[in-house]
Amino acid sequence: LLPKYCATLIYCFVHATMHLIRVILLNVAINTSSNAVFLIIVTNNFAEIKSTVFKRYEEKSLFPIITSDIVERFYLLLDIIFVLARLSISQHSGTFTAPDICFWLFLLVVLEIGTDWIKFCLIAKFSEMQTKTFEVYRE
């Protein structure tokens, strides 16, 4: 029982550290320059498309991909909330104004959703699936 407890504790620590690093990276990117934010957005989305698209999928194997996208969007929402909270209590004003920050965060969300759409369109094309396959997940 003790090894399982220790393994769970280590996993939770690593998982929390990974999310903290994501929030810190997003915060640093927003406070430094627009190029850094754009670079993070593009590399993250390109890696996501590259890792999933060129594989062949069955209809049943789409469920884990869709649920991981839902979890990823939830994490993104939490990251944005944490960054906005951090920026709202910060005494030092960054290089960007509030509209600039909102623009980059909105762009981040839109590109994430667009990436998912492109990913599923390419999955449907390469796996020769009908688009009706995805209607099950709309409920």
Image: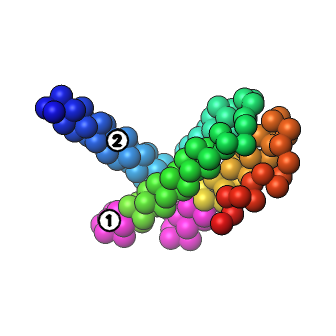
Residue 108 drawn above or below residue 118: below
Disc 2 residue crowd, few under 14, some 14–19, many 20+, Cα 10 Å: few
For the N terminus, the quadrant is top left
Residue 17 in view, yes or no: no
Tell me where residue 121 appears, x and y as whole percent: 80, 47
- Give the quadrant of residue 13: top left
Front residue (pair 18, 27): 18
- Give the quadrant of residue 48: top right
Residue at (42, 65) in percent of width and height: 81
The amino acid pointed to by label 2 is His
Label 2 residue SS? helix
Residue at (82, 55) in percent of width and height: 132
Disc 1 residue crowd, few under 14, some 14–19, many 20+, Cα 10 Å: few
Is 139 contained in the magenta span?
no
The circle on residue 90 is: 1
- The overriding secondary structure of the stretch rendered in magenta is helix
The amino acid pointed to by label 1 is Ser
Front residue (pair 114, 122): 122
Label 1 residue SS? loop
For the C terminus, the quadrant is bottom right
- Give the quadrant of residue 106: bottom right
Numbered range of the magenta stretch: 85-107
Tell me where residue 44 appears, x and y as whole percent: 59, 40
Front residue (pair 56, 81): 56
Question: In front of the other: label 2 or label 1?
Answer: 2
Residue 29 in view, yes or no: yes
Residue at (73, 37) in percent of width and height: 58
Q: Mark 2 highlights which residue?
A: 15
